[in-house]
Image: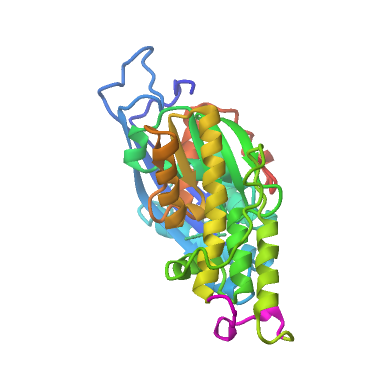
Amino acid sequence: MPSAANKQNKTLRILGIETSCDETSVALLVLERGTRNMKRQSGHQTLHDTGYTIRVIKHLIATQIPIHARYGGVVPEVAARTHVAEVVSLLDKTLGQKSKVKSRKLETLNFKLGTWNSGSFEAIAVTQGPGLATALRVGINAAKTLAWTCDKPLIPVNHLEGHLASAWLVPANRERWEFPILFLLVSGGHTELVLMQDFGKYKVLGRTRDDAAGECFDKTAKLLGLPYPGGPHLSKLAVKGNPKAFDLPRPMLHDPSLDFSFSGLKTAVRQLIEQSTQNAKRKTNNQKLGTWNLKLGTVEDMCASIQAAIVDVLVAKTIKAALKVKPKAVAVVGGVSANPLLKSELRRALRKSCPGVTLLAPAKGLYTDNGAMIAAAGLWKFLGNRKQPRWQAMDAEPDLDL
Ligand code: KG4
Ligand code: ZN
């Protein structure tokens, strides 16, 4: 990473805003530079140095899960409208009431922003994509307004880079942060194996050709009548089930590529449900958990079998990639990294096949979408002096890739 020549303040505070899907989140992150390494080399400090600490001063998440659960999935228009209501309230709670915003532009325009403290941060990071276009635009417009009124730089952040940064927020992980790091990025919208060669330098080694792992958890859980989002519900029930009860496919397990495919697994589950329910007339999509009636096993057995199939493929492909690229560490990030079996199986497989390579994961509360990871990735970009667009020209990029 290039040095941060023009950012020599002892502390650097970044405001992070996330509105890409169904969580509105705002965080305030501070990087405090230690004095020990301040004058090394040309007098600049970078994120490769160790003389800094990172603290999350404030981190608020307003989840929309109960709202979308009524519809069985995210409704983009409802998500965007809910972000509008939440983002201002979260910014209010984060930036506090200490001092009036000082801005000449505001005074000339003669309107009142409220009592947000523009002196409590140096830059704003916001999710630019990927995600739902209308939802992304809510966060982006809030961030643009702040950048304009408070006269602060605006850093557009790739949501996927944010997930990578979620592991870096754990202090113990930062001590073992040695490149190259192999990431298994598993969320509701993405399943990718990414090699991180440096801050901002990524190579996608493989990705899903259809459904994402989180999507497979959610869709199969829905077939079983579990509430949205199904992943956490399915994994809880799986603890009490037999993972060998149902013989489910492990798509692309033996394919030489590092790509994934999960839609076949979803179809296999659907067919099993259709075959095994006693009442053939029952509409499988509306199957209620209480009316589940498999001849071959319980709902818990089905959950355990689905989870085992997904985890088997994710672990096998990650190990295949690790043996190929020989990373210093492997990290698992994204909403599905909350799954305990995935982490324990990855750890076990790494111990067996890649001894000495440790597994890094985010801390609880940072697995799913959040503003702290966006602020952290914003910090990487800001200190890396990566080219930023003028905030006036910035717009949502729903299909952004790494
Ligand atoms: O990263 P994330 O919050 O959103 C996206 O960027 O897509 O991930 C959400 C996904 C959902 O599919 C959810 O079901 C899944 O993460 N998830 C889980 C667990 N917790 C969340 N999947 C399996 N097991 C879990 N414990
Ligand atoms: Zn995400």
Which residue is at the front of the view, 282 or 401?
A: 282
For the question of whether residue 333 can be seen, the reply is: yes
Question: What is the quadrant of residue 225 in the picture?
Answer: bottom right
Which residue is at the front of the view, 187 or 258?
A: 258
Is 12 magenta? The answer is no
Q: Residue at 36% across / 47% down in the picture?
A: 56
Tell me residue 38's x, y (percent).
Answer: 31, 21
Tell me residue 30's x, y (percent).
Answer: 37, 41
Query: Which quarter of the rendered picture does the C terminus lie within?
Result: top right
Tell me residue 285's x, y (percent).
Answer: 69, 76
- Is the residue 73 above or below the residue 392 in the image? below
Q: Residue at 58% across / 82% down in the picture?
A: 292
Which residue is at the front of the view, 85 or 277?
A: 277
Give the residue at the far left of this rendering: 36
Q: How many marks?
A: 0
Tell me residue 353's x, y (percent).
Answer: 45, 36
Magenta residues span 282-297
For the question of whether residue 157 can be seen, the reply is: no
Q: Taking 96 as reference, is 277 left or right?
A: right
Q: Taking 265 as reference, is 353 left or right?
A: left
- Is the residue 303 above or below the residue 20 in the image? below
